Image (tube, grey):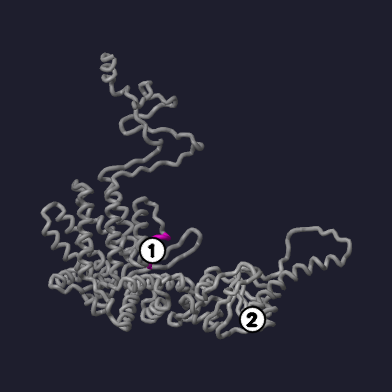
């Protein structure tokens, strides 16, 4: 037995069974070159969006295969439309989009910071420093940055209502500085803050409707304190209906009030021609019964998700009742929440609480379109923003810009702490981290210093996008922050610096906290990946294994499952 074991252990290498791990055609890459490749992919993604940062950022025109064209400088929109296919770049994009979902703005900031952190880590990886050492240093630097933000943030909780409103206006304007609506940011900031102040304490943005009306100028956009939606398709008799009610009684339905033309072929066997009329009258009796049930409720405004035909329209007009059919589900649900009444799916035995009311209902003209307005809603506060512009693409970008401003202002109302913008906070954090790094005696000192320098990508890109000399402005900012002027940021109007706090360039502190944390975690995740396996899709039938491929240690098996040595590998328990 011992002799046979000894002989088995001396089998030449060429006849040993080969270990099969991966499917044929599988591509594997690992080690330092793979980490560098991943870093390069993320840098490429960052370079695509970096020119959109700041008030002087440029727009991107994205044309898809279906012919749809989008012009925008919103980072989240660009990432969603580009949909990168590189697995690591896609991971970075997903993390950056979490910033948009959580805060509503700062997606471009996350991508730029993550790309800059990875670029700072590249020399250390190339020199053979373990990626785990770099990750540990980055997370330590991020912890230092969070502590610094806690001491630098300015809390506005104890201010008066007027001062707090002014602060929210400034925050909304700062969010709009880099958007298409920047020339009218004062006007839209009032709309944004007014819409949020119209809501309840939970600040549910689903109760803020945004309607696009082509025509007019940006300044013609306005805020409606209530629900507003475009007039739906109407039949003859609609113009005879009243268009204004004070304290209206509103009934919301999901019921079709229309005679149907049957497409199904059917045969009816009757003994008397008069019996045919009974079949015709039955359908009329059904719809009249529905209309009578509605009138009995006392409602003078009837809205339905389904169609309201010409018969019902004239029936309601004769009784001074306003009706609208084919109302969009979103608008009907928002009206339901605002009035505090459920949507009824039948007209039989309508309950007493099916009728809602508000201060005023009216139909109003906005440009070429007419809108139905419900204002003074008692149950749930709501608002509608009417956007005006010369082209549909222009208005779509206006809506994206306004959504970011609404989200940022909402977070500011919930958080009550702000930080200076214009790259001031990044420069101050960079200075603080440099000082912290000096106190560290290990190799992490160099990595944290590189992290600190990477934070300067935000003011540096602001300067570059404004067309100014980057070296001059950044060096001036470093000097001023070293002198204790912690609120100095980039002046994009003139080639120089500006006190961001005095200039009212403010941002919610949680936006910066989330951006730096997300960028650090994205960099840590990407640096922790040292191997990429691209497995081909199987063209075999379900449940059948695909062709095998040899492992790195040797060749693959033959068709019979035999190795080159004619032996099958066995696994010992």
Tag count: 2
Q: Position of residue 202 (x, y in %)?
A: 40, 71
Please identify the residue farthest to the front as the structure is shown: 352
In the rendered image, residue 78 lying in the magenta stretch gets the answer yes
For the point 14% across and 59% down, the residue is 437
Report whether residue 122 is seen: no
Question: Is label 1 in contact with label 2 (beta carbons under 8 Å)?
Answer: no
For the point 31% across and 67% down, the residue is 511
Q: For the residue carrying disc 2, how many other residues have a C-alpha within 10 Å: few (<14), some (14-19), or many (20+)?
A: many
Please identify the residue farthest to the right as the structure is shown: 272
Q: Looking at the picture, tell me which residue is in the foreground, 116 or 325.
A: 325
Residue identifier under label 2: 321
For the point 20% across and 68% down, the residue is 427
- Which span of residues is magenta-colored? 73-81
Residue identifier under label 1: 101
Quadrant in which residue 270 is drawn: bottom right
Between the C-alphas of marks 1 and 2, the distance is: 43 Å
Q: Is residue 281 above or below residue 239?
A: above
Q: Quadrant of the N terminus?
A: top left
Q: Position of residue 386 (x, y in %)?
A: 48, 78
For the point 40% across and 36% down, the residue is 23
Report whether residue 19 is seen: yes
| Position of residue 7 in the picture relative to residue 200 (left or right) | left
């Amino acid at each position: 037995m011992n002799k046979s074991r000894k002989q088995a252990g001396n089998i030449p290498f060429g006849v040993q069974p080969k270990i099969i791990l991966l499917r044929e055609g599988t591509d594997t890459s690992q080690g330092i070159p793979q980490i560098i490749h991943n870093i390069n992919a993320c840098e490429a993604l960052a370079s695509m969006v970096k020119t959109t940062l700041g008030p002087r950022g440029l727009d991107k025109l994205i044309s898809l295969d279906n012919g749809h064209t989008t012009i925008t400088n919103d980072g989240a929109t660009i990432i969603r439309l580009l949909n990168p296919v590189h697995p690591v770049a896609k991971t970075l994009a997903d993390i950056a989009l979490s910033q948009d979902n959580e805060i509503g703005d700062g997606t471009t900031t996350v991508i730029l910071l993550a790309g800059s952190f990875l670029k700072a880590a590249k020399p250390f990886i190339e020199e053979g420093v373990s990626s785990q050492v770099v990750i540990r240093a980055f997370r330590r630097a991020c912890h230092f940055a969070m502590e610094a933000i806690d001491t630098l943030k300015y809390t506005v909780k104890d201010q008066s209502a007027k001062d707090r409103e002014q602060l929210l206006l400034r925050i909304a304007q700062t969010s709009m500085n880099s958007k298409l609506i920047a020339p009218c940011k004062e006007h839209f900031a009032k709309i944004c803050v007014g819409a949020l102040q119209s809501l309840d304490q939970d600040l549910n943005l689903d109760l803020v409707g945004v309607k696009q009306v082509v025509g007019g100028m940006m300044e013609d956009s306005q805020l409606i304190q209530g629900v507003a939606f475009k007039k739906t398709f109407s039949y003859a008799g609609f113009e005879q209906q009243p268009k204004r009610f004070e304290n209206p009684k509103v009934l919301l339905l999901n019921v079709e009030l229309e005679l149907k033309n049957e497409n199904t072929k059917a045969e009816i066997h009757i003994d008397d021609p008069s019996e045919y009329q009974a079949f015709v009258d039955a359908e009329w009796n059904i719809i009249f019964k529905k209309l009578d049930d509605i009138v009995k409720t006392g409602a003078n405004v009837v809205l339905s998700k389904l169609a309201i035909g010409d018969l019902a329209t004239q029936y309601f007009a004769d009784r001074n009742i306003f009706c609208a059919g084919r109302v969009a589900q979103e608008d009907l649900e928002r009206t339901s929440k605002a009035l505090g009444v459920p949507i009824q799916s039948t007209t039989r035995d309508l309950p007493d609480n099916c009728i809602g009311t508000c201060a005023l209902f009216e139909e109003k003209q906005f440009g070429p379109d007419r809108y139905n307005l419900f204002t003074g809603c008692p149950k749930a506060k709501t608002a509608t923003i009417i956007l005006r512009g010369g082209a549909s693409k222009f208005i779509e970008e206006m809506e994206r810009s306004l959504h970011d401003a609404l989200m940022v202002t909402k977070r500011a109302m919930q958080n009550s702490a702000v930080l200076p913008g214009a790259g001031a906070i990044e420069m101050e954090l960079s200075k603080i981290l440099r000082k912290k790094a000096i106190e560290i005696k290990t190799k992490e000192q160099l990595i944290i210093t590189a992290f600190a320098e990477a934070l300067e990508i935000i003011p540096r890109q602001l300067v570059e996008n404004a067309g100014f000399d980057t070296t001059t402005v950044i060096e001036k900012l470093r000097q001023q922050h070293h002198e204790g002027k912690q609120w100095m940021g980039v002046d994009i109007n003139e080639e120089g610096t500006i006190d961001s706090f005095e200039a009212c360039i403010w941002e919610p502190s949680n936006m910066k906290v989330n951006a730096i944390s997300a960028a650090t975690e994205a960099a840590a995740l990407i640096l922790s990946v040292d191997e990429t396996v691209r497995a081909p899709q199987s063209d075999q039938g379900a449940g059948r294994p695909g062709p095998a491929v040899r492992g790195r240690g040797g060749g693959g098996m033959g068709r019979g499952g035999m190795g080159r040595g004619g032996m099958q590998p066995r696994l010992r328990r």
